[in-house]
Amino acid sequence: MSQRTEKKIGKRSQAVSAKRRLILTAALAVFSQYGIHGARLEQVAERAGVSKTNLLYYYPSKEALYVAVMRQILDVWLAPLKAFRAEFSPLEAIKEYIRLKLEVSRDYPQASRLFCMEMLAGAPLLMDELTGDLKALIDEKSALIAGWVHSGKLAPVSPHHLIFMIWAATQHYADFAPQVEAVTGATLRDEALFQSNGRKRSAHYY
């Protein structure tokens, strides 16, 4: 294969990746507003600036596009938990995990709300991912937490419930953002609220 041909293939691959990202970004906005049943591919295509035919070239159905968006959300969701490692002390690990989860709620509120909608619907299109990669990672980190409890480094706590509590506390700021702002007059975009939440919640579990 010539160098010129390789460059053409590389440029084509970059263009395809860029188009996929554009479509996924548009789909996230539309799905998070209307849900999978209320959203139309025409809305996604218009928002992405592509034709419906072009969209269907990349994603053959609304369901396929929706699952692709949800998988992307899961990647963002799981990244903070992957950083939860044994070389940290329990306090450091929990503080960092809460901080990263708050960042996700702050930076990806649409993704958090769409994920919540899917869970409320019973996760009909995402159950394989939940029982696969997500469960495997949760089991791995739960074993780490259980080890800290067993060694006396962490107060007795159910590992799964601890993780669920952190999810509930941090994702609340995205899923119920209007309520948070109505009560506190602030959002996670306000640095004071962001920092105070991380400090208070991590201290509670140690």
Image (cartoon, rainbow, N blue to C red):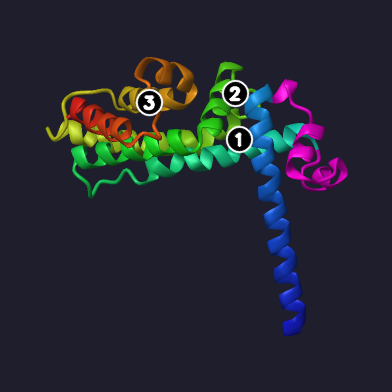
Answer whether residue 48 is visible to the viewer in this image: yes
Seen in the picture, residue 135 relative to 38 is either above or below; the reply is below
**Answer yes or no: do the residues labelled 1 and 2 have beta carbons within 8 Å?**
yes
Provide the residue designation for mark 1. Answer: 70
Q: Quadrant of the N terminus?
A: bottom right
Residue that extends furthest to the front in the rendered view of this protein: 185
The reply, left or right, for residue 67 in relation to residue 163 is: right
Q: In front of the other: label 2 or label 3?
A: 3
Q: Quadrant of the C terminus?
A: top left
Provide the residue designation for mark 3. Answer: 186
Label 1 crowd bin: few (<14), some (14–19), many (20+), radius 10 Å: many
Q: x and y percent of residue 119 in the render? A: 55, 21
Q: Amino acid at mark 3?
A: Ala
Marks 1 and 3, how far apart in space?
28 Å
Which residues make up the magenta segment?
A: 36-60
The reply, left or right, for residue 156 in relation to residue 72 is: left
Q: Earlier in the sequence, mark 1 or mark 3?
A: 1
The reply, left or right, for residue 31 in relation to residue 103 is: right
**Answer yes or no: do the residues labelled 2 and 3 have beta carbons within 8 Å?**
no
Q: x and y percent of residue 126 in the render? A: 61, 30
Toward which corner of the image does residue 153 lie, by quadrant? top left
Q: Amino acid at mark 1?
A: Met
Main secondary-structure element of the magenta-colored stretch: helix
Q: Which mark is residue 118?
A: 2
Q: Secondary structure at mark 2?
A: helix
Q: Earlier in the sequence, mark 2 or mark 3?
A: 2
Toward which corner of the image does residue 183 lie, by quadrant? top left
Seen in the picture, residue 125 relative to 21 is either above or below; the reply is above
Residue nearest the observer in this picture, 41 or 151? 41
